[in-house]
Image (cartoon, rainbow, N blue to C red):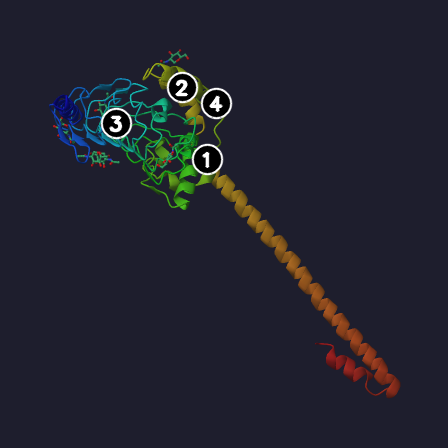
Amino acid sequence: GELFVLSSMIVLLQVAHGCPDKCRCHPSTHFVDCSQQGLAEIPSDLPAQTRTLYLQDNQIRQLPAFAFRSVPWLMTLNLSNNSLSNLAPQAFNGLQRLQVLNLTQNSLLSLESRLFHSLPQLRELDLSSNNISHLPTSLAGPWENLTVFAVQHNQLQQLDGALLESMPSVRLLLLKGNLWKCNCHLLSLKLWLEKFIYKGGITDGVICRSPDTWKGKDLLTIPHELYQPCPPSAPDLGSSQTQQPSSAHGAAPRPHENHSLGERDLSECEFKPKPRPANLRHAVATVIITGVVCGVLCLMMLVAAIYGCTYAAITAQYHRGRLAQTNEPGKAEGKELFGSAPA
Ligand SMILES: *[C@@H]1O[C@H](CO)[C@@H](O)[C@H](O)[C@H]1NC(C)=O
Ligand SMILES: *[C@@H]1O[C@H](CO)[C@@H](O)[C@H](O)[C@H]1NC(C)=O
Ligand SMILES: *[C@@H]1O[C@H](CO)[C@@H](O)[C@H](O)[C@H]1NC(C)=O
Ligand SMILES: *[C@@H]1O[C@H](CO)[C@@H](O)[C@H](O)[C@H]1NC(C)=O
Ligand SMILES: *[C@@H]1O[C@H](CO)[C@@H](O)[C@H](O)[C@H]1NC(C)=O
Ligand SMILES: *[C@@H]1O[C@H](CO)[C@@H](O)[C@H](O)[C@H]1NC(C)=O
C-alpha cells in the first residue's frame, strides 16, 4: 500500500517535472528554454509550474486560442523571432499573471484590443520589428500595469492618443522606425507625448515619414499652430465602423486600406505651412498696433503730467506772489514769477 502511494507520488512528481523533448527545464527556477529548436508549435507537455518560457528563434506560425492554458503561472514569455502573422483573439487567454510578453521579430500585421484584455498584469509588451500597420484606436478600459510599450520598426502611420490614454502607468514608449504620417490625425499623439515627457516619461521620438514637408522631422518639433483640426471626416467614421467586423474575424483585411477616400481626406487636413506667415503677420501687426497705441497713451499721460505740474507750480507761485504782494506791494511780483516759471 505505502509502496504504491510512494511510487505514484514519484510518478506524479515526474509528470510535474516532465520536460518537453526539445526544451531544457530548470525546475528550481521554473524556467523552460525551448529556443532555437525549429519548433512549429507550442510544445504540449510544458511543466505546469513554468514561470519563464523561452520560445524565441523558432518557426511558430500561429497561436491557437488558449495556447498557453497548461502554464497558468507564466510571467515571462519570449516569442521573439518566430513567424507569427496571426494571433487568435484568445491566444493568451488564461495568462492572468503574465508580466512580460516579447513578440519582436515576427510578421504581425495588426493587433486588436481583445488580445490585450486577457493580460491584466502585463508590464512590458514588446512588438518591435513586426509589420503592424494598425493598432486599436483605444482599449475598452485602462491597462493599469503596463509600463513598457514598444512598437519600433513597424508600419504604423497613425497612433491614436486615446490608446495611450488607456495605459496610465506607461513610462517607456518606443515608437521609432515607423511610417508616421504627420497630419492632423497625429495631433492627439503629439499632445499626449508632450504631457508624457513633461511627467518624466521616456520615448525615442516620432520621426515623420510623410508628408514631404515634414519628412525626417520629429513630430514634437512641429509647432502646434501648423495643425488644422481634422474635419469630422469619413476616415474616422470608417475606422470606428470597421473596427468591430475586423476584430470579429481576426486579421481580416481592413476596408480602411481602400485609400481612395482616406487619402483625400487626410491630405486635406495635413499640417499646412502656408497659414503660418499669415498668422505671424497678424501677430506682428497686433504687436505693432498695441505698441503704438500704448506709446501714444504714455506720451499723452506724460504731457498731461508735465502740464499739471507746471500749472500747479505756476498757481502756487501766483498765490505766493499774491501773498508777497500784500506784504510788500510792488517789489517781488515780476521777479519771482519769471524766475521760477521755467521749472
Ligand atoms: C532567428 O531564428 C533563426 C532560427 O529559427 C536563427 O537562425 C536566426 O539567427 C535568428 N535571428 C536572430 C536575429 O536572432
Ligand atoms: C526574451 O525575452 C525576455 C523578455 O522580453 C528578455 O528579457 C530576454 O532578453 C529575451 N531573451 C533573448 C535571448 O532574447
Ligand atoms: C525582446 O527580445 C528581444 C530579442 O531577444 C530583445 O532585444 C528585447 O530587449 C526584448 N524586449 C524586452 C521588453 O525585454
Ligand atoms: C496591477 O498589478 C497589481 C500588483 O501586481 C495588482 O494588484 C492589480 O490587480 C493589477 N491590475 C490589474 C488591472 O490587474
Ligand atoms: C514584413 O515587412 C518586411 C520588411 O518591411 C518585408 O520584407 C516582409 O515581406 C513583410 N511581411 C509581410 C508578411 O508582409
Ligand atoms: C474603394 O472603395 C470604392 C467604393 O467606396 C470603390 O469604388 C473603389 O474601387 C475602391 N478602391 C480600391 C482600390 O479598392
Q: Position of residue 123 (x, y in %)?
A: 32, 35
Residue 271: tell me if it is visible.
no
Residue 169: tell me if it is visible.
yes
Tell me which label, 3 or 2, sits earlier in the chain: 3
Q: Position of residue 270 (x, y in %)?
A: 42, 30
Q: Residue furthest front?
A: 1
Tell me which label, 4 or 3, sits earlier in the chain: 3
Q: Are marks 1 and 4 in contact (CB under 8 Å)?
A: no
Q: Position of residue 182 (x, y in %)?
A: 38, 33
Q: Which residue is mark 3?
A: 130
The quarter of the rendering in which ligand 4 is drawn is top left
Q: Secondary structure at mark 4?
A: loop
Q: Is mark 1 within 8 Å of ligand 6?
A: no
Q: Is mark 3 within 8 Å of ligand 5?
A: yes
> Neighbour class for label 2 at 10 Å: few (<14), some, many (≥20)?
some
Which amino acid type corresponds to the residue marked 4 in the rendered image? Ser
Q: Is mark 2 within 8 Å of ligand 6?
A: no
Work out whether residue 122 or residue 96 is closer to the camera in this orientation and state it. Answer: 96
In the rendered image, the quadrant that contains the C terminus is bottom right
Q: Which residue is mark 4?
A: 233
Residue at 73% of width from left, 80% of height from top?
340
Whole-number angstrom distance, CA of label 4 to CA of label 3: 29 Å
The residue mark sitting in front, 1 or 2, is 2
Q: Secondary structure at mark 1?
A: loop
Which amino acid type corresponds to the residue marked 3 in the rendered image? Asn
Q: Which residue is mark 1?
A: 227
> Neighbour class for label 4 at 10 Å: few (<14), some, many (≥20)?
few
Q: Is residue 104 above or below residue 321?
A: above
Q: Are marks 1 and 2 in contact (CB under 8 Å)?
A: no
Q: Is mark 4 within 8 Å of ligand 6?
A: no
Q: Which residue is mark 2?
A: 243
